[in-house]
Amino acid sequence: MAKTNKQPFYKNPWVLGGGIALAVGTAGYFIFSGNGKDEKSPGNITNQVDLDLLLNQSGSSPSPKPTVPASTVANDSFPLRFGSKGLRVKQLQQALIKAYGPSILPKWKDDGDWGNETQTALSSKGWPTLYNSQAELDAAMQKSAPGNSSRFNPELVAKTIRNAINSKNLSSFTITKDQLILLKSPSDYKAVSDSLQTGTILGVRRNLVNALVGDSMPWPVAAKTYFKGELTRMGLEYDAGNDRWSLPALGFVSPQIAGRRLISATNATVWDGNKHLFEVPPGLYLGVATRQENGVTEFLTSKDRKFYAQSNSLSVV
């Protein structure tokens, strides 16, 4: 029986249906659609706003929206978006700061002006970048409301776990256990594990699996047994033969890529499942990594749209 080659999780944008390689020059990218006509790239992406519009709009073939005249957005009336100014923008910025701390808007803070810093902050945290009504704005700002039992703040959970373990006292297990109860799904695990690695635990940057059940961690056997049960409850899978944990469809839980926020490190070529390509300049936020294979990284945008890019053109933040 002939051996079946495993198909990659992504579609190679430089290969046509018959296996013919498609050459792409630096002057401009193009692909062939089903009717044999070439489909042009959506144009040059020069800033975070253009990129967010392109990645998160609906439809299978992204194309940039026209630039909104400044006169139509230089106030805080709806729709509220990049370029808006006023009290509503200030309230939105204050909600971001309350949820994530002052480092989320380090330069301009809550100045009431929706510029690149606010746009990047919203995108990186998965908040909407367009508000059509007061109800939509209130729903977003509710994420930072104190006492909101439905709010899940992965950065706060990660910080609490990290501080509890580093304290090395009798309450470390109880505090960590209480925080793990808040994690309900693999996506919750990824969010907390990503935030956990912004600091060190016992002098080393660790993902959540390593912090809970790693060989070098000084937890008692009973504690590690409990943590393994919690990881299973969250939806992680354990491979006893290789003694490693994984997320469904993501592969081995690695601090290097899965769940990490991605930016373009160089001029990055990005494409979707239909092989529509566009080029992104360095330093722009793309989305959250989901998996990596054969030098290609898959990532999701804040609207859960799936895209791909060459791994060597990306950096994690």
Image (tube, rainbow, N blue to C red):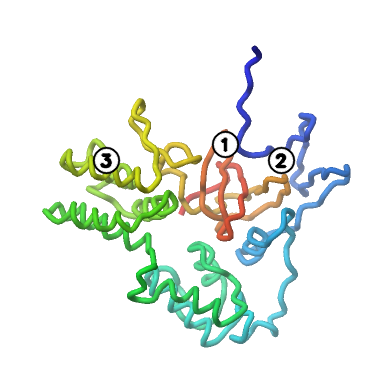
Neighbor class of circle 2 (other Cα within 10 Å; few <14, some 14-19, many 20+) is many
Mark 2 or 3, which is nearer the eye? 3
Real-space Cα separation, disc 1 to disc 3, in angstroms:
29 Å
Task: Classify residue 22 by image quadrant.
Answer: top right
First in sequence: mark 1 vs mark 2: 2
Percent position of residue 144, x then y: 40, 73
Dot 2 corresponds to which residue? 13
Dot 3 corresponds to which residue? 213
Residue at 36% x, 55% y: name it: 183
Percent position of residue 77, x then y: 62, 86
Percent position of residue 293, x then y: 55, 36
Q: In the picture shown, does residue 108 fall above or below 245?
A: below
Element assignment for label 3: helix
Task: Classify residue 123 by image quadrant.
Answer: bottom right
Label disc, if present, on residue 295 of the rendered structure: 1
Quadrant where the N terminus is found in the figure: top right
First in sequence: mark 2 vs mark 3: 2
Q: Are marks 2 and 3 in contact (CB under 8 Å)?
A: no
Mark 1 or 3, which is nearer the eye? 3
Q: Foreground: 76 or 237? A: 237
Amino acid of disc 2: Pro
Q: Tell whether 161 sits left or right of 184.
A: left
**Residue sticking out furthest to the top:** 1
Q: Tell whether 221 sits left or right of 195.
A: left
Neighbor class of circle 3 (other Cα within 10 Å; few <14, some 14-19, many 20+) is many
Real-space Cα separation, disc 1 to disc 2, in angstroms:
14 Å
Amino acid of disc 1: Gly
Residue at 72% x, 79% y: name it: 69
Amino acid of disc 3: Val
Percent position of residue 8, x then y: 61, 33
